[in-house]
Image (spheres, rainbow, N blue to C red):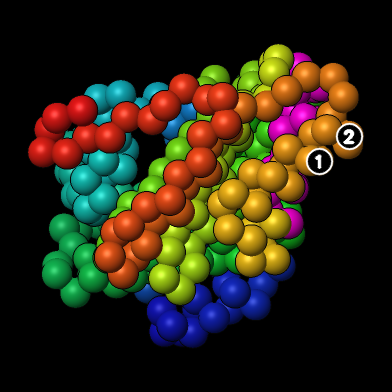
């Protein structure tokens, strides 16, 4: 089977089986001793190995591998595949980034019998890139990837908060790069961010609901829903803020939310900005804040 044919088979497979299809394809095509997919956890400080033996039904927590000082960290930071000799085993380890538009989803790791040539490295890179699309397409239909990213249990408030985030926490394009994260990932209650890319603009929001419990997460849900509803109806920033405020007045009788809305033109760089009781942002240009 060709690489293209195997990837088509992975896309056609059940969501929980697609990783196994890719692993089998690479083993056969490159005579690899082993193939693994490692997914980044919510904290961004470690990766978790997902393989055929892993199951969301297991009572064992996923294996957490700290990134600091490892080849994995080097690959994630550089976004370039790396080759390393394994010494005693005489196998060659290849680690490639599984990334889509700046969203560092995870890593593809292979152990090969010989040093790969340029053509093999190209195939590995293309497969890793295609795997990113497969993961993105499948993670909406299974909890396998969510399970793998949770090296610590999420609080109920954090569970609600993570559902409010954009589908990808980072996005790179020719004109911009945007990225965000919640810290600590396992215990947050009121903080959210969102972004959307239109034909000529990129819009962003940052909001902070009062408190750090489930009540704060519910307030955040109310505001994010109101902002998205207004934005998708074509409202400008002022109208988005007005509708979010109205939603709070009508339904969020306990507590308050601060926030910021930002719209940047991708044509000329002009910016609209609304601040609602939130600490002001910092802008850096030429190394100066």
Residue furthest to the left: 286
Please tell me in which quadrant of the rendered image residue 141 appears.
Answer: bottom right
- In the picture, the disc for residue 38 is none
- Looking at the image, how many numbered discs can be counted on the residues? 2
Q: Horizontal and vertical percent for residue 172?
A: 35, 57
Q: Horizontal and vertical percent for residue 61?
A: 65, 26
Residue under label 1: 247
Residue 234 visible to the viewer: yes
Q: Secondary structure at mark 1?
A: helix
> Which is nearer the eye, 162 or 202?
202
Which residue is located at x 30 percent, y 24 percent? 68
Whether tag 1 and tag 2 are in contact, CB under 8 A, the answer is yes
CA distance separating discs 1 and 2: 6 Å
- In the picture, the disc for residue 251 is 2
Which residue is located at x 23 percent, y 70 percent? 122
Predominant secondary structure in magenta? helix
> Which is nearer the eye, 251 or 236?
236
Which residue is located at x 54 percent, y 29 percent? 182
Above or below for 48 versus 230:
above
Residue 28 visible to the viewer: no
Relative side of 145 to 106, left or right: right
Say whether residue 3 is magenta.
Answer: no
Residue range highlighted in magenta: 213-229
Q: Residues within 10 Å of mark 1 (few under 14, many from 20)?
A: some
């Amino acid at each position: 089977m060709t690489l293209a044919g195997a990837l088509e088979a992975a896309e056609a497979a059940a969501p929980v089986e697609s990783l196994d299809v890719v692993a089998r394809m690479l083993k056969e095509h490159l005579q690899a001793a082993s193939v693994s997919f490692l997914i980044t956890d919510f904290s961004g400080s470690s990766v978790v190995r997902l393989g055929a033996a892993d199951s969301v039904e297991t009572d064992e927590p996923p294996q957490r591998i700290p990134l600091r000082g490892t080849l994995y960290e080097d690959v994630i930071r550089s976004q370039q595949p790396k080759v390393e000799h394994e010494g005693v085993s005489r196998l060659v380890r290849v680690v490639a980034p599984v990334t889509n538009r700046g969203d560092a989803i995870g890593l593809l790791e292979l152990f090969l019998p010989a040093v790969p040539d340029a053509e093999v490295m190209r195939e590995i890179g293309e497969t890793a890139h295609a795997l990113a699309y497969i993961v993105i397409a499948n993670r909406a239909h299974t909890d396998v990837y969510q399970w793998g990213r949770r090296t610590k249990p999420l609080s109920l408030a954090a569970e609600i908060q993570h559902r409010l985030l954009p589908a990808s926490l980072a996005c790179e394009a020719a004109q911009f790069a945007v990225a965000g994260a919640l810290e600590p990932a396992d215990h947050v209650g009121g903080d959210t961010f969102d972004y959307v890319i239109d034909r000529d603009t990129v819009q962003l929001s940052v909001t902070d609901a009062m408190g750090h419990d489930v009540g704060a997460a519910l307030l955040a849900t109310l505001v994010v829903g109101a902002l998205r509803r207004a934005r998708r109806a074509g409202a400008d920033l002022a109208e988005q803020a007005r509708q979010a405020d109205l939603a709070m007045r009508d339904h969020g009788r306990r507590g308050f939310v601060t926030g910021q809305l930002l719209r940047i033109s991708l044509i000329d760089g002009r910016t609209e900005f609304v601040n609602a009781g939130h600490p002001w942002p910092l802008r850096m240009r030429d190394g100066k804040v």
